[in-house]
Image: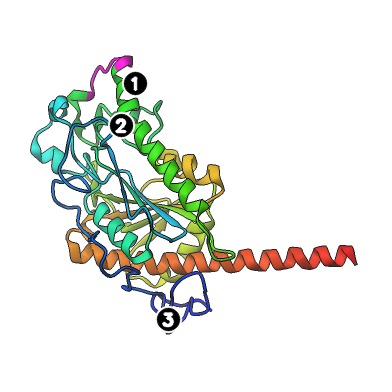
Amino acid sequence: MRGVCGAQGVAKCKIWNVEQGRCGVGEPVHKNSKHQPGGMANDVPGGTPTDEPGDVVELINGAGQSPVVLVCEHASNFIPEQFNALGLDQAALQSHIAWDPGALGVAQAMSTLLDAPLAASKISRLVYDCNRAPHALSAMPVKSETFDIPGNARLTDMQRQERIETYYMPFQTQLAACLDDSMAKPQMPDAVSCLVTIHSFTRVYNNVPRDVEIGILHDSDARLADELLRGCLNAAAYDIRRNDPYGPGDGVTHTLKEHGTSRGLANVMIEICNDLIIDEAAQLAMAQLLTAALREALCQLSAAATDHGAQRSLKGAASNG
């Protein structure tokens, strides 16, 4: 039986610590976790910005036991000192072009609620967008929406390669190791491992208002997106759409393809309008909604995998008989 978030939809699912027939909204596995929602201040995840090589990604709750691995590629607007703010003023650096405001707070709260590892970038997407392949022009954009990025103009091949090696590769290596560790952990039978990336977007883009409030994005593997869209998110009081405001054609599914699809993991990218997650309370509320929806979706995928396995066993027994 399906239900709205917090109802009876996943009462019989054994993958999650679900009690009293609820989806587990607002019930963190580790109530004393030090990782609390945040992410609207001018900070990188995990503490004070540094210019140390390799200090570009933080693994939060790396020992988490959930089959979910969370990613926040645009968690920070920090630009190392040597780049001279890429020639931008503070207004631009605080805007959505430099990071995804509120996304880290939602991701951190979900990490606590799910007991899930979270890989978060500590460098602005303008220095290197870790959700883009090295060959993508938008990996080091010369323009973002209406803003020119002077510090990215006329980069030499050597400068681009240096950024790839300094910012992109360590992030990819850390995320790959996190996923490998997660997949190696003992899981309950039929638990579905998955990769979930958390992003935010601006309400108005290029002077055009957007109606969508939550986007459920996927590439070729739509399993998790399908379940989220047909499950308890349907009952949420938001405008929720598939592959909107972005989709695979916009080049935004790099992490999903590189780390999810390549491993056979269910995967999804969740985009949230940033005016819905402007403070800690709003970020926690959104995290609770998404956590409940994700738990229900994964339980449905688990049930489908169990049914498929049972059908294969029956067919095998019939053919042997």
In the rendered image, residue 211, in percent from the top left (x then y), is placed at 30, 57
Q: Which residue is mark 1?
A: 161
Position of residue 207 relative to residue 266, above or below, is above
| Residue 266 visible to the viewer | no
Q: Residue at x 22, y 48 (%)?
A: 45
Which labelled disc corresponds to residue 272? none
> Please, what secondary structure does the residue beneath circle 2 have?
helix
Q: Quadrant of residue 68?
A: bottom left
Which labelled disc corresponds to residue 19? 3
Crowd tier of the residue under label 1, counting other residues whose Cα lies within 10 Å: few below 14, some 14–19, many 20 or above: some
The amino acid sitting under disc 3 is Glu
Viewer-closest of 309 and 235: 309
What is the span of residues highlighted in magenta in the rendered image? 152-158
Q: Residue at x 26, y 18 (%)?
A: 155
> Please, what secondary structure does the residue beneath circle 3 have?
loop
Q: Which residue is mark 2?
A: 167
Q: Quadrant of residue 7?
A: bottom left
